[in-house]
Image (tube, grey):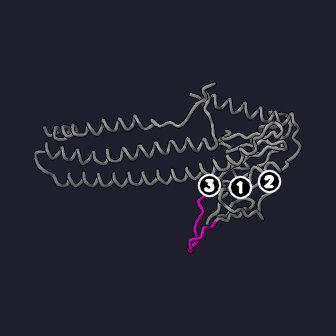
Amino acid sequence: MAWLEYLLPLIFLFPLAATAVIVLALRNLHDASVTSPFDAHPLREPGQSLRDRLDRAFAGLFLNGAMGPIVTLAPLVYGMGRMLFASEQDWIEWALYGVLCSVLVLVYCFLLMRDFQRIRRLKLGLACELAVGQELERLIRPEAHPFYVFHDVPSDGATIDHVVVTPHGVFVVETRARTRPFSPSGEEIDLVHVEPTRLRFPGWSERQPLDKTRRVTRWLSNWLAELIGKPVPVMGVLTLPGWKVETTQAPPDLLVVSGDGLATTLAEMPLGELDTATHDAVIQRLLERASRLDGQAAP
């Protein structure tokens, strides 16, 4: 029976298939998320959303790195089995197996390079988030200095990197990480120009960071006003760690800074009237939202 010549070589693929099953079972073995021992809610740190994305990126790198050799060897192993059971040798068929192996090698090389670049970008973003979060933590003092910092606050369809509540206003802090280019002489170019609707980096420009900062700032302002019953002074802040920021043409509704000395800047910037009752109500509403959303995310 001719069909047995194609069926019997599948026996040689069983070890590869078993290894693939083990790899798939272990892909989510590393889970860096932790929960509180008191209430089982997820514990959140600065840049937690980027940490989660980085964990998923490493899981993808592990999966592609482990499955790549298994998948690329499968046509070769099957072809060797075909050579044992075939009644006659068909060199065109063997060449097809070789071509398929080569194509699969190229595909997985591309996937691994993509994963490497993705992890590199996420690590840069996480480093910037941690740097800004560490700077903002300096705002936290005893009761004589009523500052409060929230990290990774979910808004309407987006996540706010940081929300800072001060005695004189609320700040929405967004962080963007961008790699600094080099000049032909090898010097690093680290100057970004801020315009009303875009950031002009050396060689490219972006509108999305300013747009998102405005959007989440508007959302938080409306959300707090609706819950508290009166307007709350809210301002958006966009930080670009590692960059020198030129703000001659910067928009008046946003603060764009490098992030260095951010705690001092926010502590000394009055936004408007924020009495003690409103200040405490803002913190309470944000605490309730964080607790409610963490409860929904808890396993």
Q: Which residue is mark 1?
A: 260
Q: Which residue is mark 3?
A: 177
Q: Are marks 3 and 1 in contact (CB under 8 Å)?
A: no
**Magenta extent:** 178-189
Residue sitting at 62 percent across and 44 percent down?
47
> How far across and how far down the image is residue 85, in percent?
13, 42
Relative side of 297 to 80, left or right: right
Indicate which disc, 3 or 1, sits on the residue closer to the N terminus. 3
Q: Secondary structure at mark 3?
A: loop
Give amino acid for label 3: Ala
> How far across and how far down the image is residue 67, in percent?
36, 44
Relative side of 259 to 183, left or right: right
The secondary structure that dominates the magenta segment is loop
Residue sitting at 70 percent across and 44 percent down?
162
Task: In this rendered view, identify the residue nearer to me: 203 or 226.
Answer: 203
Q: Secondary structure at mark 2?
A: loop
Count numbered badges in the picture: 3
Q: In front: mark 3 or mark 1?
A: 1
Give amino acid for label 2: Asp
Task: In this rendered view, identify the residue nearer to me: 201 or 223.
Answer: 201
Q: Between marks 3 and 1, how big is the CA–CA gap?
A: 14 Å
Q: Which residue is mark 2?
A: 253
Residue sitting at 77 percent across and 60 percent down?
250
Task: In this rendered view, identify the residue nearer to me: 128 or 89.
Answer: 128
The image quadrant of residue 229 is top right
Indicate which disc, 2 or 3, sits on the residue closer to the N terminus. 3
